[in-house]
Amino acid sequence: MNDGSAEREVVAADDERNRAMIEADYETLDRLLGEGLVYTHGNATSDGKARYMENLRSGKVRYLWTQRDKVCVRVYGETAVMHGDVVLRSRRDGVERTLSNAFMTVWVKGPGGWQMVAWASTPKPGA
């Protein structure tokens, strides 16, 4: 029987990922993002892990603030799907903007813990 501990672990890993994005803690991000990451942005473009990390390290993209809401996590063995709403403030190519999106992530549990292997978001209507 699932006692909810895996769901809490995934939420904690995502909390750590969000903190690392905002604090530019690339070592933590590298640990939390799976090598096969597919990061699909709200504009329907996708990056792999290397490109995503390159954009962060170079300063092209900087996350300033983020808040999740209405989060739901479902665990299927060593895989978890998280979805909900997110509002984030970012700076891309020097331009700040606030995004209000629905998101879905996929997490896989390996020897080193939970890693995010997929992210997809889409702008919420009227946002």
Image: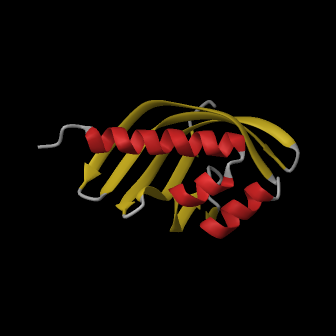
How was this image coloured?
secondary structure
The image shows residue 12 at horizontal and vertical percentages of 44, 39
Given residues 123 and 32, the one toward you in this image is 32
The quadrant holding residue 91 is: top right
The image shows residue 107 at horizontal and vertical percentages of 41, 55
The quadrant holding residue 110 is: bottom left
Farthest left residue in view: 1
Residue drawn at (27%, 40%), measured in percent from left and top?
Answer: 5
Whether 28 is drawn above or below 12: the answer is: below
Query: Would residue 63 appear left or right of 10 to someone viewing this image?
Result: right
The image shows residue 121 at horizontal and vertical percentages of 55, 48
Whether 10 is drawn above or below 110: the answer is: above
The image shows residue 111 at horizontal and vertical percentages of 37, 64
Residue drawn at (57%, 38%), measured in percent from left and top?
Answer: 101
Given residues 121 and 74, the one toward you in this image is 74
Query: Would residue 118 appear left or right of 89 to someone viewing this image?
Result: left
